[in-house]
Structure formats: C-alpha cells, structure tokens
Image (spheres, helix red, strand yellow):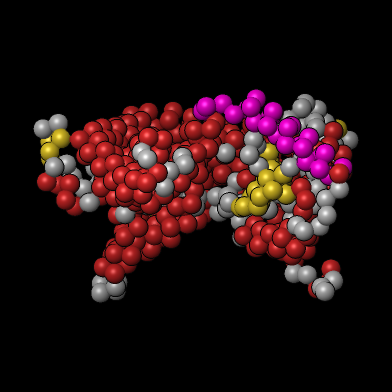
Amino acid sequence: MRTTNDLTPHAATAAAILPLVGGAANVTSVAHCMTRLRLGLRDRTLVREDALRSLPAVLGVVTDDDSYQIVLGPGTVARVTPEFEALVAGTAGAPVTGTADALAARGAEWKAARQQRNATPLKLLLRRIANIFVPLIPALIGCGVIAGLGGLLVNLGWLPSLTPALAAIASGFMALIAVFVGHNTAKEFGGTPVLGGAVAAIVVYAGVAKVTAFGMTLAPGQGGVLGALAAALLGTYVEKWCRRWVPEALDVLVTPTLTVLITGLVTLYVLMYTAGELSTAVGTGANWLLDHTGVFAGLVLGGLFLPLVMLGLHQALIPLHTTLIQQQGYTVLLPVLAMAGAGQVGAALAVYVRLHHDQSLRTTIRSALPAGLLGVGEPLIYGVSLPLGRPFVTACAGGAAGGAFVGFFSMLGDKIGSTAIGPSGWALFPLLKGTGGLALTAAIYAGGLLTGYVVGFAATYFFGLGRTVGGTVSGVCDSSKQGQDTDLGGNPPP
C-alpha cells in the first residue's frame, strides 16, 4: 500500500480533493475538459469549498446545473482525472450509512430543484451544442497545426515533396467533419449515433452533385456542419417516432431504413440548400461586420468574450468558427475573441504588481499565467479576477481594446484569421492566416495582444484595485479571508 510520500503530485492532488468533495460515496460521475475536473455530486452541501480552494493545485471552482467543476488548468487536469477516478473506484464499495443515504436523497432533491430553476431552454440548448462540438476540438487543433505548418513550408518553398502529404493529413478530418458532427448530435439527443453519422454523411458524399434542389445542382459539403447537425437532429426525431409505432418484430429492419430514407430525402431536398444559404450568410455577415465596423465589432466581441467564457457559453460559437473554416479556410472571429485572454493576462499582472503583500494570490497568478498566455483563461478568471470583482471588468476593457486594434486593420483590408479553433494567445501564432503575408498577419495579431496586455494592466492598476491606504489597497482582504465575498472595492463579486 502506497503512503502519501509515494504518491505522484497528480495522485496527491486527487487524494486531497476527494475528501473535500464529500468522499467517493458523494461522487456520481467524473469527467474533464481542457481545464476543469467535472464532478457529478449527490449532495453539494458536503463540499468543503474553502478548503478545496486553498489547495495549491486548485485554481478555482465553478458550479452549474450539471456538474461541480474544479479548475486545475490544462495538462494538469488530464493527469489528475484518472488518478481521481481510480480513487473513487477503489472506495466505491465502502458501506453507506443510513445518514449517508439520507444526505444523498436530500442532495438529489436539492439538485433537481436547482436544475428546474436554472435549466432555461437557451442554457440547455447551448450546453447541448457544446457537448456536440467540444469532443472534436483535439482533432481540430491537431489538423489546424499541421495545416499551418504545411502552409509555412509552402510559403518558404521548403520540402515540396512533403507538403502534399501534410495537406492530406490536415484536410482529411475537415472533409469528413460532418459525419462526426452527425454522430455526436444523435448521441447527445438520444438517437443511435451511427444513424446520425449515416444521414450526415449524405452532406459530404460526392454523389450529391447529381441531385437538383430548388432548381440548383447541389455541391458536396453544401450546408457544412450546420446541415449535418440539422440532418442528424431530424434523424433522431424520425428514429424516436419509428420506435413508438413500428412493431418490435420489425424494428431492427424498418426503423433504420425509414430513419435514413426519410431524413436523407429531406436533407437532400431541403436541409442542404437551406443550411447552405445560412452558412453563406454566416460567412458574409462575419466578413461584412469586420470590414465595415471593424473597430466597433472588435470592441464588442473582445470585451464580451470573457463573460461568455465565465458562463461556459463560448463553446456555442464553435459551429460558427467551423463554418467559417470550411468556407474560407480560416475563422476571422477567433483572433478578435482571443484578445479577451490578453486583457485577462494584463489584469492579472497588475494584480500581481499591486498586491505584493498577498503571497497566496501571487502564487496563484504565477501558476495560472502560463496557461493564460497560451489562451486558456479559466484559471485566471476563476482564480484571480472574478473573485476580486473589479479586475474582471478591467480585464474585459483590455480585451475590448485588443479586439478594436485587430478590427481596425480588418477595416483597412488586412484581415487575419485562424485555421483551427481551440488555442489562442501565443498558441494561435502557428494557426494564423490572413489576406496579407505571414509576417503582416503575425504582426497585427501580436499588436492586438500587446494592446490587450497594456490596456488590461493599466485599467486594473489604476481603476481595478481601489485606492492605496497606508501601503495596502483599500477593500482588499487577505487571501485567508477571501471567503467574506468582497471585491477590492468592498463590493460583492458579480
């Protein structure tokens, strides 16, 4: 049996977290995303949140209707999660007392009541859209980086025999992304995943070029991911209808056939054309917005993106990014939105400089800053700016300034974009593509980041931390007293 000293750092973190969330008996599910350990808990009143937040590896805590989320940061969360799962599995067979049963029942009732209050149709829809696309992000990142590398080699004239192979590797997933979207859509909405993939595959099949709809010949890929999503969603409802009315003896034969046939015909003669027009409108609208109102659009998009990240709603933008990448080869929205992370970094640096007496907070900033520079904003949001209150607002100001900078050059015709989604911050440089040369594109993006850093820092340093009294900042509690829930001006956090 291993002692505490034998544990790896990640196993030690998992072992420290488990008792603070109520033990294995209180954990109903374990998952993770890029930065967060997502737990399903029977009774959230058993969580010792103050102690949990004080763990060195924990950068913040977020709650929503479905899960209790512990922000650990990129890389770390992927290593802590299997250790945590092993601990939960190893103690799952422990006896449960009557008191524990009562607490579990009360926790389930509390969770159901909370979900009923907060589960608005819009929140549920956005969460489901995120569940469809988030699993695709690793492939989008990998293929995007390879595409960027291939483009760089082409521009430099290097390794001409290798670049076609890189292009094939990078483009294969994007050519068939509709199938993966259809599979995940059916899975998310309660259908058979392979049937969702089957009807979505119609969208990218080369043979659709022989089909005419609304007097126009269809093109393979017309409608893109939006068409695939709509096709799979329709297929799920057709399948569920068949399950209700088709006799059980005929279900295995009739249900899949009717699902694919009915949905396929509607996809060919309605959805592909309609989704194609919608996709075109998305691309045209995004380009028009930046070409004609670039400064204002960048100001709004860069300034409001952090609140979307805070609420977890930023993932609902993935279909728009994917549509733009399919149409144009890059998304013009991501570099603008990435400026929000620059504002967050600038704000964190200002807090680090001003609050030199708060060693705990400075330690949190040092650990979260590398992730922030690479565009992962949750650790800084939940570990620094949001608990303090005002720095979150001044970080948004930095993001708005950086977005306006990028938007200004878009109005001049120097548009920049990203060939993939997922990374931002410094990690976005290998994915940049634009109407100008590589050097100009990188320079504009770097200028936007620098603007976000400077404005976020200045706004936080002068306006986000209150006035200085006797060498300390007024309204600031010592990190050991942050449970009082006041920001740097003495106000409750947002």
**Above or below for 43 versus 214:** below
Residue 93 seen in the figure: yes
Query: Is 453 situated left or right of 326 in this image?
Result: right
**Above or below for 304 versus 40:** above
**Above or below for 335 versus 234:** below
State the image coordinates of residue 222 (x, y, percent, origin top left). Answer: 24, 42
Could you tell me what secondary structure mostly forms the magenta stretch?
A: helix
Q: Quadrant of the N terminus?
A: bottom right
Start-end of magenta stretch: 99-122
Q: In the depicted view, which residue is nearer to us: 6 or 446?
A: 6
State the image coordinates of residue 52 (x, y, percent, origin top left). Answer: 80, 48
Residue 332 sits inside the magenta stretch: no
Residue 116 sits inside the magenta stretch: yes
Q: In the depicted view, which residue is nearer to us: 479 or 179?
A: 179
Q: In the depicted view, which residue is nearer to us: 459 or 433?
A: 433
Identify the residue at horizontal 49%, vertical 33% (top origin): 125
Which picture quadrant has residue 395?
top right
State the image coordinates of residue 337 (x, y, percent, origin top left). Answer: 48, 40
Query: Is 462 situated left or right of 220 in this image?
Result: right
Which picture quadrant has residue 407?
top left
Identify the residue at horizontal 80%, vertical 32% (top origin): 485
Q: Quadrant of the C terminus?
A: top right
Identify the residue at horizontal 39%, vertical 57% (top origin): 144
Query: Is 3 situated left or right of 66 in this image?
Result: right
State the image coordinates of residue 184 (x, y, percent, origin top left). Answer: 43, 48
Q: How many marks?
A: 0
Which picture quadrant has residue 229?
top left
Query: Is 303 situated left or right of 490 in this image?
Result: left
Residue 156 seen in the figure: no
Identify the residue at horizontal 17%, vertical 46% (top origin): 208
